[in-house]
Amino acid sequence: MQRLFFSFLAGALFGAGLLVSGMVDTTKVQGWLDVFGDWDPTLAFVMGGAIIPMTFAWIYGRRRETAVLGNPIPLDGKTEVSRTLVLGSLLFGAGWGLAGLCPGPSLASLSFGGLGGLVFVLSMMAGMYAAPAVRGQIDRAAAAN
Amino acid sequence: MEQDWIWGLVGGLMIGSAGALYLLVNGRIMGASGILGGLVDRSGWSTGGERLAFVIGLIAFPPLLVPLYREVDTHITDNFAVIVAAGLLVGIGTRLANGCTSGHGVCGISRLSLRGLVATVFYLLGGGLALVLFRHILGVI
């Protein structure tokens, strides 16, 4: 129950931060990516602001090793820079630029984003559902070469 | 607007605090695409309750703050072909890359993860190229 409560709390604070920062506004995101247009630097302040508390969390987490609710803090992430990491990030970035939404803000704005916001989230979930099959295709194509 | 960067910084600190809470209390990495994606493709159903609680908080809390603002508008395009294409690309891309702006960007860069840094460079590149192609050359967004 505690685990669910703190998950809910983290999601709520994340969503509040996305709203306050203006990242639910697609024009601000596209304004940041559009370096040849009317460039908007806000996203850099959001990213910088978010990295500050997270940096301290990792430093403290490395000392603690165990989370407050008992399980180990995931300190050893994957290190391999793979083909799918690069390709997936390029595809994600293209979609992010097209609509000005990434997964967090699309969920945070679901209640007030209208039909367009809902269609985006449903399309994104369809893409997530298809992704394991796409990964399989890429791996097979790579193995054949 | 002039003070946009201040609210960007404040909101950013809130986002990072949410990530810190999720890491230190729950022992999990706060990545929106991973949390939702694991529910969608069933790979994360063993931790489904925590994922669902996070998603519910993320969807249900922001509307409570909306009345504090004169106007909240996502300004999303009304071109549904663009919306569907963008959604599919974001869904497939984030799952292939195992992360998005929150997981790779916020949580990855803050621990000096090479994967997080590489992902961030390439999704910024993909986004920048999308704006050049679809806004400045084709004029569809």
Image (cartoon, rainbow, N blue to C red):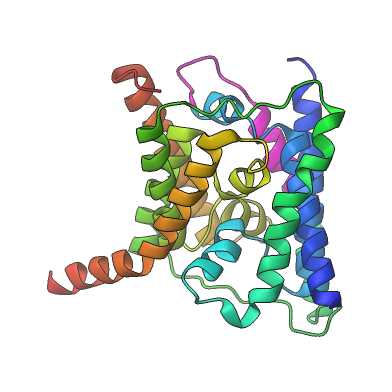
Q: Position of residue B49 (x, y in %)?
A: 69, 75
Q: Is residue A85 visible?
A: yes
Please tell me whether residue A49 belongs to the stretch shown in magenta: yes
Q: Position of residue B1 (x, y in %)?
A: 73, 15
For image coordinates 72% across by 62% down, the residue present is B54
Residue closest to the far front: A115
Q: Is residue A83 left or right of residue A78?
A: left
Image quadrant for the C terminus of chain A? bottom left
At x 61% / y 22%, what residue is drawn? A40
Q: Tell me where residue A134 appears, x and y as whole percent.
A: 30, 64
Could you say which is closer to the camera, residue A111 or residue B29? Answer: A111
Would residue A107 be counted in the magenta stretch?
Answer: no
Q: Residue at x 46, y 45 (%)?
A: B123
Q: Nearer the viewer, residue A52 or A126?
A: A126
**Number of marks drawn:** 0
Q: Using the image, determine if residue B100 lies above or below residue A79.
A: above
Pick out the residue farthest to the left.
A145
Please tell me which residue is depicted at 63% across the width and 30% down the height of the picture: A25
- Residue A124 falls left or right of residue A113: left
Q: Position of residue B114 (x, y in %)?
A: 53, 60
Question: Residue B71's image quarter?
Answer: top right
Residue A57 visible in the current orientation: no
Q: Is residue B104 above or below residue A27?
A: below
Image vertical order of residue B24 relative to residue B87, above or below? below
Instruction: Please state which of residues A137 and B81 is positioned toward the viewer in this rendering.
Output: B81
- Stretch of the chain drawn in magenta: A34-50
Is B4 drawn above or below residue B97 in the view shown? Answer: above
Whether residue A120 sits left or right of residue A19 in the image: it is: left
Looking at the rendering, in which quadrant would you find the N terminus of chain A? bottom right
